[in-house]
């Protein structure tokens, strides 16, 4: 584990806005430059990983966040596709994790190390979107407050009842809570605006002299990631002194991501994903963030959630009324060649047309999300499939039951 520390240049509000604009809306020439630098860095990193690792899983873990299927394409599949992989089952959660909730969890070991090393022993630790760290703190008899907007956590982790407080709210809004902690630990979605927003909230929640500990995504997650990281670290340095521990955070591979790997011809690699750990000793909070930043609800849209068995099924909140009878054939339709979605990335173009999305990474378009939501609500109440769709047979295509079984990855 490498550690980097040192002073960083002063950064003002106008400079931040300029750098955000350069990252989010680059000119064509600038975009070409960013992409060229990314390809060069990826090839160099891959060469080093192939030379230093004995297994494909080891190579993937050294690729600084580049998705394994993209690594295989970069390497042309000559070494990485032909090896015998050791497969690991997905960790089980009840209900399952969902990509739209950005539920990539730390391994249990990483969570315990974070709580043990950085959680406050005598004061309060606030965890933003890091429920496994909160659970570890509870097991270590630490005083912990969890902020997370997902109510499914209360079913997954009954131990949360032993925490000081649980706030079901977006972490970006948590800065307005009347709390001050000795340590704030957060794991935001791996995007610039999310990390900036959560960092701002954390700076409002930590006392002077306390610590902000957060996960920072690695430099090959996407072409602009290196620029994003540099901006995030520059902003963090205005809060206080900082250190960066490279590849210190190990993540589980959730079921929805394992399905992407299987779909691309790769088996599950349980712990390939790594993140960097940033430690900030806080001296003053951030005064503000650049105006006009788009945060997660604006980017992802609004969704309804249904828990059917162990699955979490999300339906986009938009009503597309049937204009003529033929459209009922599109009540459920695959986004691609099958219901299995081949990527969970925000950058994937098909994501914008997904209307129904399951925790097993099956997705569909729908001509009537209102009707689909009604049927899923009945299934979530425990009704059988024939009973749930029976009153609506005149409004649904004849093969809808089979389609729904395929979408939910369950037997007919």
Image (cartoon, rainbow, N blue to C red):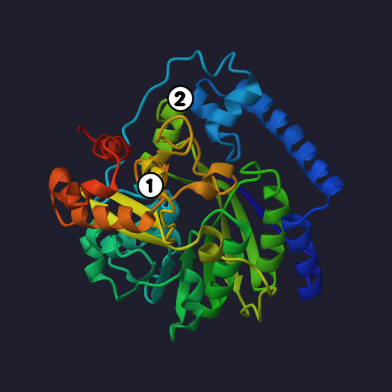
Q: Can you see residue 248?
A: no
Circle number at residue 235: none
Q: Do labels 1 and 2 touch, CB within 8 Å? A: no
- Residue at horizontal 45%, vertical 31%? 261
Instruction: Judge by depth and name the residue closer to the eye, 24 or 77.
Output: 24
Instruction: Judge by depth and name the residue closer to the eye, 313 or 328.
Output: 328
Q: Is residue 206 left or right of residue 291?
A: left
Residue under pointer 1: 325
Q: Position of residue 326 (x, y in %)?
A: 40, 43
- Residue at horizontal 17%, vertical 50%? 388
Circle number at residue 266: 2
Spatial separation of the CA atoms under disc 1 and disc 2: 41 Å
- Residue at horizontal 76%, vertical 62%? 21
Q: Is residue 47 left or right of residue 349?
A: right
Q: Position of residue 379 (x, y in %)?
A: 20, 51
Q: Please tell me whether mark 2 sits on a helix, a strand or a loop.
A: loop
Q: Is residue 163 left or right of residue 292?
A: left
Q: Quadrant of residue 112?
A: bottom left
């Amino acid at each position: 584990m490498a550690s980097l520390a040192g002073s960083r240049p002063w950064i003002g509000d106008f400079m931040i806005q300029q750098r955000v604009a350069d990252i989010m809306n680059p000119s064509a020439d600038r975009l070409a430059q960013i992409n060229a630098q990314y390809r060069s860095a990826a090839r160099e990193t891959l060469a080093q990983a192939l030379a230093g690792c004995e297994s494909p899983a080891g190579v993937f873990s050294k690729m600084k966040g580049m998705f394994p299927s993209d690594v295989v394409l970069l390497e042309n599949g000559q070494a990485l596709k032909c090896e015998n992989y050791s497969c690991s089952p997905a960790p089980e959660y009840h209900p399952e994790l969902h990509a739209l909730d950005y539920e990539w969890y730390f391994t249990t070991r990483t969570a315990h190390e974070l709580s043990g090393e950085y959680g406050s022993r005598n004061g309060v630790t606030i965890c933003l979107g890091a429920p496994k760290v909160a659970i570890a703190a509870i097991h270590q008899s630490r005083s912990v407050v969890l902020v997370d907007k997902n109510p499914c956590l209360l079913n997954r982790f009954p131990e949360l009842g032993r925490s000081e407080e649980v706030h079901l709210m977006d972490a970006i809004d948590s800065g307005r809570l009347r709390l001050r902690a000795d340590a704030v630990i957060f794991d935001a979605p791996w995007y610039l605006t999310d990390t900036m927003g959560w960092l701002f909230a954390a700076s409002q929640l930590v006392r002077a002299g306390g610590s902000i500990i957060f996960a920072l995504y690695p430099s090959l997650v996407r072409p602009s990631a290196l620029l994003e990281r540099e901006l995030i670290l520059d902003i963090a340095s205005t809060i206080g002194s900082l250190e960066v521990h490279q590849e210190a955070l190990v993540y589980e591979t959730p079921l929805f991501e394992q399905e992407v790997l299987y779909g691309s011809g790769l088996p599950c690699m349980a712990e390939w994903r790594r993140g960097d750990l940033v430690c900030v000793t806080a001296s003053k909070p951030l005064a503000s963030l650049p105006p006009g930043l788009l945060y997660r609800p604006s980017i992802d849209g609004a969704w309804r959630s249904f828990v059917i068995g162990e699955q979490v099924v999300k339906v986009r909140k938009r009503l597309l009324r049937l204009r003529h009878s033929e459209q009922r054939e599109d009540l459920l339709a695959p986004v691609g060649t099958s219901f299995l979605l081949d990527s969970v990335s925000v950058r994937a173009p098909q994501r914008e047309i997904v209307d129904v999305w399951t925790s097993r990474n099956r997705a569909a378009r729908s001509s009537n999300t209102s009707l689909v939501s009604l049927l899923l609500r009945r299934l979530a109440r425990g009704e059988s499939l024939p009973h749930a769709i029976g009153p609506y047979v005149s409004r649904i295509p004849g093969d809808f039951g089979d389609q729904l079984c395929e979408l939910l990855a369950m037997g007919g």
